[in-house]
Image (tube, helix red, strand yellow):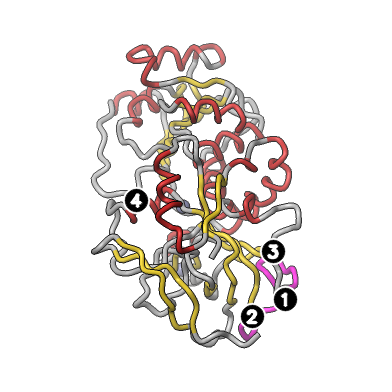
Amino acid sequence: MSIPTSCRALAFDPESTEFDLRELPMRPLRRGEILARVSLSAICGSDLHTIRGRRDPGGPIVLGHEICGTVAALGEGVEADSLGAPLGAGDRVTWGIAASCGRCFYCARGLPQKCARLFKYGHETIDGDTPLSGGFAEYCYLVPGTPVYRLSDGLSDRLAVFANCSLATMQAAVRMAQVTPGDGVLIQGAGLVGLCAAALCAHRGAEPVVLLDPREERIALAQDFGASHITDPGEAGDDLVSELHDATDGGRGFDVAIEACGAPSALRTGVEALRIGGTYLLAGCVYPGATAEIDLQRLTTRLLRLQGLHNYTPLDLQEALRFLEHGRHRFAFARVVREVFPLDQIAAALDLMESDPSVLRVALRP
Ligand SMILES: [Zn+2]
Ligand SMILES: [Zn+2]
């Protein structure tokens, strides 16, 4: 295909906090790149942080990193996806949230998600080398080092669109926390990230899986994502920790607790809810100044492990997609994307997402 000279893109200006639907110039493909026609891009919670001024992207930007699309053109040297499946124009694909170089200090040590030259979709400003790298545009350039996977016919755009952020990140969480059958898991926060964690833990045979969230609408959802016990932290008050212990085998506490709510105050409850030798995994506090106070004696004498999580590896996305193939029937993933809007209705999309607590995702179809 010949590449158009420009395409429609929603540029977000962090200074005015306004979106501007405009034409952005397109360039020829470079060696190793893929041009994707964006078919669906969901609005992630972290996009909302940027849009509402809680996070500075550093300049005007095309947001959107929960994406899937079709191959529009292949650059020189690209014939297959990251698993070796042949790629051609029109093939449906999703791709990793970030591209890594494969050669730097961190890439060489199995931490490609923290590559020194990390390129992150929906996070690069439009004055950079690749302005079209977000989902809120007709086209997205996939740079070399991006894990790209063909989507099976069984995974619709609505099902696949959140795999490369929420689901793959929580796949990394269950991997790093080593969730195994019979483990009791506490998940703090029933946003899409927490619900994905619940489904992944239930799929691995964890029992019980307990979700904590004060929102009634989310508690109703939790059961459809494999959570067997649900507690409202607001109602339980001071007795929460003992209630949580009571929910676990022998009252010992949870093997794993996953923080997926972004509230530093969750740390204390999470740590106190763990059994001796348990693991606390932090995933949500991705903003500056998220400080919390905990009793270090408890951490020390109960042999607890604290584990941070940010981004994920290509293998996590592969696993997430494999899980989705099977898990789409058992869990309520089909209900994740509530509504789809065109680019010029971004305001209506944001309004729906922020006004109804039962909405997990709305998406844009550029
Ligand atoms: Zn995201
Ligand atoms: Zn690297």
Q: Which residue is mark 3?
A: 150
Contact (Cβ within 8 Å) of mark 1 with mark 2:
yes
Q: Which residue is mark 1?
A: 88
Q: Amino acid at mark 1?
A: Gly
Chain-order first, disc 3 or disc 4: 4
Q: Amino acid at mark 2?
A: Leu
Front in this rendered view, residue 276 or 211: 211
Contact (Cβ within 8 Å) of mark 2 with mark 4:
no
The vertical placement of 169 against 258, above or below, is below
Q: Amino acid at mark 4?
A: His
Chain-order first, disc 4 or disc 1: 4
Q: Position of residue 215 (x, y in %)?
A: 43, 28
Contact (Cβ within 8 Å) of mark 4 with mark 1:
no
Q: Inspect the magenta stretch and tell me whether residue 73 lies in it.
A: no
Specify whether tag 4 is near ligand 1 (CB below 8 Å): no
Q: Secondary structure at mark 4?
A: helix
Q: Amino acid at mark 3?
A: Arg
Image quadrant in which you'd find residue 207: top right
Chain-order first, disc 2 or disc 4: 4
Q: Which residue is mark 2?
A: 74
Q: Residue at x 69, y 50 (%)?
A: 322
Q: Residue at x 65, y 79 (%)?
A: 78
Q: Which residue is mark 4?
A: 49
Q: CA distance from mark 3 to mark 1?
A: 10 Å
Chain-order first, disc 1 or disc 2: 2
Front in this rendered view, residue 49 or 145: 49
The answer to whether 333 appears left or right of 123 in the picture is right
Q: Position of residue 126 (x, y in %)?
A: 37, 74
Q: Where does the magenta region start and end? A: 74-86
Q: CA distance from mark 4 to mark 1?
A: 36 Å
Image quadrant in which you'd find residue 271: top left
